[in-house]
Amino acid sequence: MHNPQLNKDGKLKHLLSIEGLPRAILNQILDTAESFTGVSEREVKKVPLLRGKTVCNIFFENSTRTRTTFEIAAKRLSADVLNLNVSTSSQSKGETILDTVDNLTAMHADMFVVRHSQSGAAHLIARHVAPHVHVVNAGDGRHAHPTQGLLDMFTIRRYKPDMHNLRVAIIGDVLHSRVARSEIHALTTLGVPEVRVIAPKTLLPQDVEKLGVQVYHDMRAGLKDVDVVMMLRLQNERMSGSLLPSAQEYFKCFGLTQEKLALAKPDAIVMHPGPMNRGVEIDSAVADGMQSVILPQVTYGIAVRMAVMSILAGSNDA
Amino acid sequence: MKIHIKNGRLIDPKHGVDGQHDLYIAAGKVVGIGEAPAGFVANQSIDASGLIVCPGLVDLSARLREPGYEYKATLESEMRAAAAGGVTSLVCPPDTEPVLDEPGLVEMLKHRAKQLNLAHVYPLGALTRQLAGAQLTEMSELTEAGCVGFSQADVAITDTLVLWRALQYAATFDFTVWLRPEDPYLAKSGVAHDGEIAARLGLRGIPAAAETLALEIIIRLVRETGARVHVCRLSTAESVSLLRQAKQQGLPISADVAAHYLHLTEFDIGFFDANCHLKPPLRTQRDQQALCAGLADGTIDALCSDHAPVDDDAKLLPFAEAEVGATGLELLLPLTVKWAQDRQLALSTAIASITSRPAAIIGLDAGHLALGAVADVCVFDPAQYRRIEAKSLISQGKNTPFIGMELPGVVRYTLLQGQLVHQA
């Protein structure tokens, strides 16, 4: 099947999902990000790679953090940035996603960074846009959040350079998590030999093992000897109901505490995509502890998004 | 009008006919098979050399979108599509706007269809008013107006007591109740089979149990009430087994499957192809195999198109928000021929599932070509392939997962009561 993310030369045209991307492209993004980490520390935090280009952040679903990091990344590449929060109300007035995209294309945007609450929205937009326009998926429903997956890989690589020798555990609400899906595909593509998911059965998709992961329901067994602990956010509305009885019981069974973390390797790192629910999925002592790399993740997010945007801009068909 | 269809291979599954026989038609009826009746002089003769001559197709599920959804399709556009697909009798579900729950609406629909005179239209009445699952409709009146059965379309009855009573009431008059088995809670907000693809794409799943659980309840209620039930659009392997057991026990139950499910699986969703947003969802290869086998061995009685024309805009949305359904009238025959080819089935067995077998479910004297039968005829080329393209579809709905595919079986002539309604 035609891969909608690559152009005819096999170069990255859109970033919609980690799934289906070759390892070489993931490494290219990570290596490029490496070269951008210095930019943020300079006095003049800019490079001219996207000068004259317009990047349009279209957020059909609210997000401050992700939008801000995309905005900073685009500005550091010298692009003009347009932020658009398409509230659900204007959608209900009848304008469809593609109407919105057409309008912005008419204003000569070169790149769309899109977040939407529905899985597949970024693919839909990528199928529809003019040939010179690039689409970056900033999160679509439960499907994918590829830049988050990439920045997580960047972080892991910084602390654990030998990806072929890692045991990684992803813990929490995999069912509703686009982050988890992107992390799983990124880890398996980069050759991590053992990826575990740890969650109650109500928070795991059917047939999740077909994504190449090992399933654990007991957190203690699942954490044993892992090198990387990746926590997922649990949405408030899912903490009590038919998925879970209570936040307290969830924390007791699946929350990350120092005591449980001690079962992992002594030098294991702890990650979280944010925003955290302290005391629900992660104990504050762990979140702020020695093994936590949660804040570096945020910092690296900018370099990774710069890398993605610069690579896309460089893939225009001649 | 007297028509002589010559040199064709006549396949009439109901009567075990499969061979080179000419067909002679006069006054809308079959008047001769193999040899002309005395004094027959044709006004028109059709050369069917290399072609197959079979009964006009009987489609158990085609949404014509009238009344109420004329922006999606009209009676005329869809009946022309039926004629182009060789379909001469079609059953339409009651989920129009307004819902077909009053005799006047049914009479109007029948009248409009009769005027267009491109296919026989057999409406299903709503089983409950507004399909709301609470109050029964006037089934007896609706039957007099022309309904051939009663259905909830895609809306499940949540209150089991209402379902029980609906079946009891229908059984009183020996009406057939058409139900698509789906537990409304297990299927709630789901858009794809609850399996690997839903896991990968982050789509809400509909487990196979949503169908089998509902089917088990239906089978139990059939046993309790004695009602005749036709279960629609099966999608799982387990359903085929349940149905097989129910039939072995002699329960008055029949079933159909839509043509998509013989050829596609959850994997065909690919990168969120909204044309594969169907209800029930496309399932696994194992389910597909079981449906094919169940249809071939007669456990599943009929194959239908589940024709649902959708306007383009309604498909240009993220997968879950895109409207459900696919256009199908013009694909029913090609998909049947392809099924026969893929599974190495006798063509007459395959054709039975779109002619005589569905006709039997609605108790219709159609779907066969005995002497004296109504001359609804489909003449098609089984060896010719056609590329399915939006612009060549006559239906107003261009939405199908088969766009761009080459499918065998091209309809050349369709006759309705001895009148040529399509020629290509």
Image: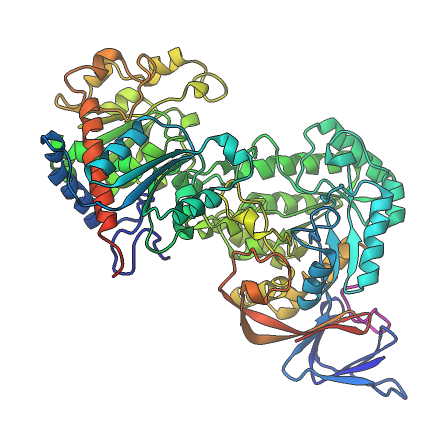
Name the main secondary structure of what is drawn in magenta. Answer: loop
Relative horizontal placement of residue B84, taking residue A172 as reference (left or right): right
Number of on-image labels: 0
Q: In the depicted view, which residue is nearer to us: A25 or B346? A: A25
**Compared to B74, does B334 lie above or below?**
below
Q: Quadrant of residue B298?
A: bottom right
Q: Is residue B380 within the magenta segment?
A: no
Relative horizontal placement of residue B117, taking residue B82 as reference (left or right): right
**Compared to B6, does B185 lie above or below?**
above
Q: In the depicted view, which residue is nearer to us: B129 or B343? A: B129
Residue located at (66% from left, 41% from top)? B154
**Compared to B76, does B109 lie above or below?**
above
Figure quadrant of the N terminus of chain A: bottom left
Q: Position of residue A57 (x, y in %)?
A: 34, 37
Q: Please report the bounds of the magenta region as a residue range.
A: B364-375
Res B224 visible:
yes
Q: Quadrant of residue A183?
A: top left
Figure quadrant of the C terminus of chain A: bottom left
Residue located at (12% from left, 23% from top)? A267
Q: Position of residue B69 (x, y in %)?
A: 69, 48
Q: In the depicted view, which residue is nearer to us: B298 or B96? A: B96
Q: Position of residue A285 (x, y in %)?
A: 22, 11
Q: Is residue B368 within the magenta segment?
A: yes
The figure's colour scheme reads rainbow
Relative horizontal placement of residue B290, taking residue A42 as reference (left or right): right
Q: Position of residue A314 (x, y in %)?
A: 22, 52
Q: Quadrant of residue B189?
A: top right
Res A193 visible:
no
